Image: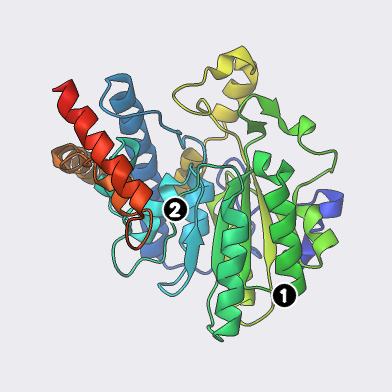
Amino acid sequence: MIERFDPLKAEMLRVLDETGAAAGDLEPRLEAEDLKKIYALMVTTRTADTKAFKLQRQGRMGTYAPSRGHEACQVGSAFPLTKDDWFFPYFRDLGMYLTLGYPLSTYYRYWMGNEAGLRTPDGLNIFPLAIPVASQIPQAVGAGLAANIRKLRLAVVCTFGDGATSEGDFHEGMNFAGVFRTPNVFVCYDNQWAISVPRSRQTAAATIAQKAAAYGFPGVLVDGNDVLAVYAAVHEAAERARSGGGPTLIEAFTYRLADHTTSDDASKYRKKEAVAEWEKKDPIERFKAYLAKKGLWDEAFEKSVRDAVADRVEKAVAEAEASPPPSVEDLFTFTYGSMTPNLEEQLEEAKAAKEGVR
Protein backbone atom coordinates (compact mmCIF):
# COMPACT_ATOMS: atom_id res chain seq x y z
CA MET A 1 0.00 0.00 0.00
CA ILE A 2 2.80 2.42 0.85
CA GLU A 3 4.06 2.33 -2.74
CA ARG A 4 0.75 3.83 -3.90
CA PHE A 5 1.71 7.17 -2.38
CA ASP A 6 4.65 8.92 -3.99
CA PRO A 7 6.40 11.29 -1.55
CA LEU A 8 8.15 12.99 -4.49
CA LYS A 9 4.69 14.20 -5.54
CA ALA A 10 3.71 14.99 -1.92
CA GLU A 11 0.95 12.35 -2.11
CA MET A 12 -0.37 11.73 1.40
CA LEU A 13 -1.71 8.49 2.85
CA ARG A 14 -4.99 9.31 4.59
CA VAL A 15 -7.63 6.88 5.83
CA LEU A 16 -9.92 9.35 7.64
CA ASP A 17 -10.90 12.74 6.32
CA GLU A 18 -11.39 15.61 8.75
CA THR A 19 -15.03 14.61 9.35
CA GLY A 20 -14.04 11.08 10.36
CA ALA A 21 -15.25 9.44 7.15
CA ALA A 22 -13.07 6.51 6.07
CA ALA A 23 -11.69 5.57 2.67
CA GLY A 24 -12.90 1.98 2.54
CA ASP A 25 -10.05 0.53 0.49
CA LEU A 26 -7.46 1.87 2.95
CA GLU A 27 -9.23 1.19 6.24
CA PRO A 28 -7.14 -1.26 8.33
CA ARG A 29 -8.79 -4.43 9.57
CA LEU A 30 -9.07 -3.79 13.28
CA GLU A 31 -11.60 -5.32 15.66
CA ALA A 32 -14.10 -3.05 17.35
CA GLU A 33 -12.42 -3.55 20.73
CA ASP A 34 -9.06 -2.53 19.27
CA LEU A 35 -10.57 0.64 17.83
CA LYS A 36 -12.07 1.52 21.20
CA LYS A 37 -8.76 0.77 22.89
CA ILE A 38 -6.95 3.11 20.51
CA TYR A 39 -9.41 5.86 21.38
CA ALA A 40 -8.93 5.26 25.11
CA LEU A 41 -5.15 5.41 24.67
CA MET A 42 -5.41 8.72 22.80
CA VAL A 43 -7.60 10.17 25.55
CA THR A 44 -5.21 8.85 28.19
CA THR A 45 -2.31 10.50 26.42
CA ARG A 46 -4.08 13.87 26.22
CA THR A 47 -5.22 13.72 29.85
CA ALA A 48 -1.84 12.63 31.20
CA ASP A 49 -0.15 15.31 29.11
CA THR A 50 -2.46 18.03 30.42
CA LYS A 51 -1.80 16.86 33.97
CA ALA A 52 1.97 16.99 33.41
CA PHE A 53 1.68 20.60 32.23
CA LYS A 54 -0.23 21.53 35.39
CA LEU A 55 2.31 19.73 37.57
CA GLN A 56 5.12 21.70 35.95
CA ARG A 57 3.32 24.99 36.49
CA GLN A 58 2.77 24.06 40.14
CA GLY A 59 6.48 23.36 40.62
CA ARG A 60 5.91 19.63 41.04
CA MET A 61 7.63 18.64 37.78
CA GLY A 62 10.61 19.95 35.84
CA THR A 63 10.69 21.23 32.27
CA TYR A 64 8.30 19.10 30.22
CA ALA A 65 7.75 18.50 26.49
CA PRO A 66 3.99 18.46 25.77
CA SER A 67 2.45 15.96 23.34
CA ARG A 68 -0.83 17.74 22.60
CA GLY A 69 -1.73 17.20 18.96
CA HIS A 70 0.60 14.20 18.56
CA GLU A 71 -1.76 11.54 19.94
CA ALA A 72 -2.49 9.98 16.55
CA CYS A 73 1.21 9.83 15.65
CA GLN A 74 2.17 8.27 18.95
CA VAL A 75 -0.61 5.75 19.52
CA GLY A 76 -0.80 4.89 15.82
CA SER A 77 2.92 4.15 15.70
CA ALA A 78 2.94 1.96 18.81
CA PHE A 79 -0.24 -0.06 18.33
CA PRO A 80 1.12 -2.30 15.50
CA LEU A 81 4.23 -3.33 17.46
CA THR A 82 4.79 -6.71 19.10
CA LYS A 83 6.55 -7.57 22.36
CA ASP A 84 9.66 -8.57 20.38
CA ASP A 85 10.02 -5.24 18.58
CA TRP A 86 12.25 -2.46 19.91
CA PHE A 87 11.48 1.20 20.37
CA PHE A 88 13.99 4.09 20.39
CA PRO A 89 12.10 7.23 21.48
CA TYR A 90 12.73 10.91 21.53
CA PHE A 91 11.47 13.34 24.14
CA ARG A 92 7.87 13.80 22.90
CA ASP A 93 6.51 10.27 22.96
CA LEU A 94 4.06 9.93 25.84
CA GLY A 95 1.45 8.05 23.77
CA MET A 96 4.05 5.58 22.51
CA TYR A 97 5.07 4.79 26.08
CA LEU A 98 1.50 4.33 27.29
CA THR A 99 0.50 2.14 24.33
CA LEU A 100 3.50 -0.14 24.85
CA GLY A 101 2.66 -0.58 28.53
CA TYR A 102 5.19 1.72 30.19
CA PRO A 103 3.89 2.76 33.63
CA LEU A 104 2.67 6.35 33.62
CA SER A 105 4.05 6.88 37.13
CA THR A 106 7.51 5.89 35.90
CA TYR A 107 7.22 8.28 32.97
CA TYR A 108 6.25 11.07 35.36
CA ARG A 109 9.21 10.23 37.60
CA TYR A 110 11.60 11.01 34.75
CA TRP A 111 10.17 14.47 34.17
CA MET A 112 10.21 15.07 37.91
CA GLY A 113 13.99 14.64 37.80
CA ASN A 114 14.07 11.11 39.19
CA GLU A 115 16.37 8.77 37.25
CA ALA A 116 14.11 5.87 38.22
CA GLY A 117 11.95 7.10 35.36
CA LEU A 118 14.50 5.72 32.91
CA ARG A 119 14.43 2.18 34.29
CA THR A 120 12.34 0.29 31.77
CA PRO A 121 10.35 -2.56 33.33
CA ASP A 122 11.28 -6.11 32.36
CA GLY A 123 9.55 -7.31 29.22
CA LEU A 124 9.48 -3.91 27.50
CA ASN A 125 12.05 -3.30 24.76
CA ILE A 126 12.18 0.47 25.18
CA PHE A 127 15.50 2.31 25.03
CA PRO A 128 15.93 5.35 27.32
CA LEU A 129 14.52 8.48 25.71
CA ALA A 130 16.97 10.75 23.91
CA ILE A 131 17.23 14.45 24.67
CA PRO A 132 20.13 15.24 22.25
CA VAL A 133 18.35 15.72 18.93
CA ALA A 134 18.64 12.75 16.51
CA SER A 135 21.16 10.86 18.66
CA GLN A 136 18.75 7.92 18.96
CA ILE A 137 18.70 7.31 15.20
CA PRO A 138 22.18 5.71 14.82
CA GLN A 139 21.55 3.77 18.03
CA ALA A 140 18.35 2.35 16.58
CA VAL A 141 20.17 1.40 13.40
CA GLY A 142 22.82 -0.35 15.47
CA ALA A 143 20.10 -2.35 17.18
CA GLY A 144 18.70 -3.19 13.76
CA LEU A 145 22.10 -4.42 12.57
CA ALA A 146 22.42 -6.55 15.71
CA ALA A 147 19.00 -8.07 14.99
CA ASN A 148 20.14 -8.97 11.47
CA ILE A 149 23.34 -10.57 12.73
CA ARG A 150 21.38 -12.60 15.28
CA LYS A 151 18.74 -13.45 12.65
CA LEU A 152 15.92 -12.08 14.79
CA ARG A 153 12.61 -11.36 13.08
CA LEU A 154 11.71 -8.04 14.64
CA ALA A 155 11.26 -4.36 13.87
CA VAL A 156 13.18 -1.50 15.47
CA VAL A 157 11.07 1.67 15.55
CA CYS A 158 12.70 5.06 16.02
CA THR A 159 10.82 8.34 16.37
CA PHE A 160 12.06 11.92 15.98
CA GLY A 161 10.91 15.40 15.01
CA ASP A 162 11.39 17.25 11.74
CA GLY A 163 14.26 19.23 13.27
CA ALA A 164 16.22 15.98 13.67
CA THR A 165 16.39 15.60 9.89
CA SER A 166 18.85 18.51 9.79
CA GLU A 167 21.30 16.65 12.02
CA GLY A 168 24.20 14.54 10.77
CA ASP A 169 22.98 11.62 12.87
CA PHE A 170 19.86 11.44 10.70
CA HIS A 171 21.78 11.18 7.43
CA GLU A 172 24.37 8.77 8.79
CA GLY A 173 21.67 6.55 10.28
CA MET A 174 19.58 6.54 7.08
CA ASN A 175 22.57 5.74 4.92
CA PHE A 176 23.75 2.89 7.14
CA ALA A 177 20.21 1.46 7.36
CA GLY A 178 19.86 1.50 3.59
CA VAL A 179 23.23 -0.12 2.91
CA PHE A 180 22.78 -2.90 5.46
CA ARG A 181 19.00 -3.26 5.05
CA THR A 182 18.37 -3.06 8.73
CA PRO A 183 14.85 -3.78 10.08
CA ASN A 184 14.20 -0.18 11.02
CA VAL A 185 10.99 1.84 10.91
CA PHE A 186 11.81 5.55 11.11
CA VAL A 187 8.85 7.72 12.08
CA CYS A 188 9.33 11.48 11.74
CA TYR A 189 6.70 13.53 13.55
CA ASP A 190 6.73 16.49 11.19
CA ASN A 191 5.03 19.04 13.44
CA GLN A 192 6.47 21.87 11.31
CA TRP A 193 8.49 23.51 14.06
CA ALA A 194 11.95 22.69 15.44
CA ILE A 195 11.45 24.83 18.53
CA SER A 196 11.16 28.23 16.78
CA VAL A 197 12.61 27.21 13.40
CA PRO A 198 9.90 26.50 10.79
CA ARG A 199 10.06 23.43 8.57
CA SER A 200 10.71 25.66 5.55
CA ARG A 201 14.11 26.48 7.05
CA GLN A 202 14.88 22.82 7.76
CA THR A 203 14.77 21.50 4.20
CA ALA A 204 14.04 22.62 0.66
CA ALA A 205 12.59 19.19 -0.17
CA ALA A 206 8.85 19.00 -0.83
CA THR A 207 8.57 16.22 1.76
CA ILE A 208 10.82 14.66 4.36
CA ALA A 209 9.63 11.20 3.29
CA GLN A 210 11.21 11.61 -0.15
CA LYS A 211 14.66 11.65 1.46
CA ALA A 212 14.38 7.88 1.84
CA ALA A 213 14.85 7.49 -1.93
CA ALA A 214 18.42 8.80 -1.67
CA TYR A 215 19.21 6.01 0.80
CA GLY A 216 17.59 3.23 -1.21
CA PHE A 217 14.44 2.38 0.71
CA PRO A 218 10.75 3.37 0.75
CA GLY A 219 9.38 6.57 2.21
CA VAL A 220 5.76 7.58 2.72
CA LEU A 221 3.99 10.76 3.78
CA VAL A 222 0.99 10.17 6.04
CA ASP A 223 -1.60 12.37 7.67
CA GLY A 224 -0.25 12.50 11.22
CA ASN A 225 -3.63 13.54 12.64
CA ASP A 226 -5.22 10.37 11.28
CA VAL A 227 -4.46 7.55 13.71
CA LEU A 228 -5.56 4.86 11.25
CA ALA A 229 -3.26 6.18 8.53
CA VAL A 230 -0.31 6.17 10.92
CA TYR A 231 -1.25 2.69 12.11
CA ALA A 232 -1.53 1.37 8.55
CA ALA A 233 1.85 2.81 7.50
CA VAL A 234 3.73 1.58 10.57
CA HIS A 235 2.04 -1.82 10.44
CA GLU A 236 3.14 -2.36 6.84
CA ALA A 237 6.64 -1.02 7.47
CA ALA A 238 7.07 -3.22 10.55
CA GLU A 239 5.96 -6.29 8.62
CA ARG A 240 8.48 -5.47 5.91
CA ALA A 241 11.21 -5.03 8.51
CA ARG A 242 10.45 -8.35 10.23
CA SER A 243 10.47 -10.22 6.92
CA GLY A 244 13.90 -8.92 5.86
CA GLY A 245 12.64 -6.21 3.51
CA GLY A 246 14.72 -3.46 5.09
CA PRO A 247 13.90 -0.01 6.47
CA THR A 248 11.12 2.50 5.82
CA LEU A 249 10.90 6.24 6.51
CA ILE A 250 7.45 7.51 7.51
CA GLU A 251 6.72 11.23 7.68
CA ALA A 252 3.68 11.90 9.85
CA PHE A 253 2.52 15.40 8.94
CA THR A 254 1.00 17.00 12.03
CA TYR A 255 1.19 20.09 14.22
CA ARG A 256 2.51 20.87 17.68
CA LEU A 257 -0.50 22.46 19.36
CA ALA A 258 1.40 23.26 22.56
CA ASP A 259 4.72 25.00 23.15
CA HIS A 260 7.94 23.14 22.38
CA THR A 261 8.45 22.67 26.11
CA THR A 262 7.17 24.36 29.23
CA SER A 263 10.22 26.66 28.92
CA ASP A 264 9.08 27.90 25.51
CA ASP A 265 6.56 30.54 24.42
CA ALA A 266 5.44 29.62 20.91
CA SER A 267 3.33 32.78 20.63
CA LYS A 268 6.59 34.63 20.00
CA TYR A 269 7.06 32.92 16.64
CA ARG A 270 3.71 31.38 15.62
CA LYS A 271 0.50 33.11 14.59
CA LYS A 272 -2.50 32.29 16.75
CA GLU A 273 -4.63 31.96 13.61
CA ALA A 274 -2.48 29.05 12.40
CA VAL A 275 -2.78 27.29 15.75
CA ALA A 276 -6.55 27.83 15.73
CA GLU A 277 -6.82 26.19 12.30
CA TRP A 278 -4.93 23.15 13.49
CA GLU A 279 -7.07 22.97 16.63
CA LYS A 280 -9.96 22.20 14.28
CA LYS A 281 -8.01 19.15 13.03
CA ASP A 282 -7.72 17.62 16.51
CA PRO A 283 -6.79 13.93 16.02
CA ILE A 284 -8.91 12.77 18.95
CA GLU A 285 -12.05 14.52 17.69
CA ARG A 286 -11.51 13.08 14.20
CA PHE A 287 -11.21 9.54 15.51
CA LYS A 288 -14.20 10.04 17.81
CA ALA A 289 -16.28 11.03 14.77
CA TYR A 290 -15.13 7.86 12.98
CA LEU A 291 -16.11 5.68 15.93
CA ALA A 292 -19.50 7.37 16.14
CA LYS A 293 -20.15 6.65 12.45
CA LYS A 294 -19.40 2.98 13.14
CA GLY A 295 -21.69 2.91 16.18
CA LEU A 296 -18.76 2.42 18.58
CA TRP A 297 -18.97 5.74 20.42
CA ASP A 298 -21.69 7.26 22.57
CA GLU A 299 -21.85 9.45 25.66
CA ALA A 300 -21.85 6.44 28.00
CA PHE A 301 -18.65 5.10 26.43
CA GLU A 302 -17.07 8.55 26.59
CA LYS A 303 -17.88 8.88 30.28
CA SER A 304 -16.50 5.44 31.09
CA VAL A 305 -13.26 6.25 29.28
CA ARG A 306 -12.88 9.69 30.89
CA ASP A 307 -13.60 8.39 34.39
CA ALA A 308 -11.15 5.51 34.08
CA VAL A 309 -8.45 7.75 32.62
CA ALA A 310 -8.86 10.43 35.30
CA ASP A 311 -8.50 7.82 38.02
CA ARG A 312 -5.45 6.29 36.35
CA VAL A 313 -3.70 9.63 35.97
CA GLU A 314 -4.28 10.72 39.55
CA LYS A 315 -3.00 7.39 40.87
CA ALA A 316 0.11 7.71 38.68
CA VAL A 317 0.84 11.18 40.06
CA ALA A 318 0.48 9.98 43.65
CA GLU A 319 2.76 7.02 43.00
CA ALA A 320 5.38 9.15 41.26
CA GLU A 321 5.44 11.76 44.00
CA ALA A 322 5.69 9.07 46.69
CA SER A 323 8.89 7.70 45.14
CA PRO A 324 12.10 8.44 47.05
CA PRO A 325 14.32 11.04 45.37
CA PRO A 326 17.55 9.91 43.71
CA SER A 327 20.59 9.75 45.95
CA VAL A 328 23.93 11.47 45.47
CA GLU A 329 25.43 8.04 44.82
CA ASP A 330 23.16 7.54 41.81
CA LEU A 331 25.03 10.29 39.96
CA PHE A 332 28.23 8.25 40.04
CA THR A 333 27.46 4.60 40.67
CA PHE A 334 25.91 3.67 37.34
CA THR A 335 28.22 5.45 34.90
CA TYR A 336 30.42 2.34 34.54
CA GLY A 337 30.11 -1.29 35.60
CA SER A 338 32.43 -0.44 38.48
CA MET A 339 33.40 3.03 39.62
CA THR A 340 36.70 4.46 38.43
CA PRO A 341 39.10 6.05 40.97
CA ASN A 342 38.30 9.59 39.81
CA LEU A 343 34.55 8.95 40.15
CA GLU A 344 35.06 7.57 43.64
CA GLU A 345 36.95 10.75 44.51
CA GLN A 346 34.21 12.94 43.03
CA LEU A 347 31.56 11.00 44.95
CA GLU A 348 33.32 11.66 48.23
CA GLU A 349 33.58 15.37 47.36
CA ALA A 350 29.86 15.46 46.52
CA LYS A 351 28.98 13.80 49.82
CA ALA A 352 31.13 16.27 51.72
CA ALA A 353 29.54 19.19 49.91
CA LYS A 354 26.07 17.89 50.71
CA GLU A 355 26.95 17.57 54.38
CA GLY A 356 28.35 21.09 54.32
CA VAL A 357 25.06 22.46 52.99
CA ARG A 358 23.24 20.86 55.89
Residue shown at 45%/33% (left/top)?
Answer: 66
Q: Which residue is disc 2 drawn over?
A: 96
Q: What SS does tag 2 mark?
A: helix
Residue drawn at x 38%, y 60% as measured from the top left: 100
Q: Relative to residue 334, is residue 145 depicted above or below?
A: below
Q: Position of residue 133 (x, y in %)?
A: 59, 42
* CA–CA distance in space, label 1 to label 2: 27 Å
Q: Amino acid at mark 2?
A: Met
Choose between 206 and 178: the one closer to the eye: 178
> Left or right: 289 with respect to 161?
left
Q: Is residue 232 visible?
A: no
Asked if one can make out residue 345 in the rendered structure from this viewpoint, the answer is yes
**Please, what is the three-letter code of the amino acid marked with disc 1?**
Phe
Q: Name the quadrant of the C terminus.
A: top left
Give percent across and percent down for residue 356. 17, 24
In the drawing, what numbered circle is on residue 180? 1
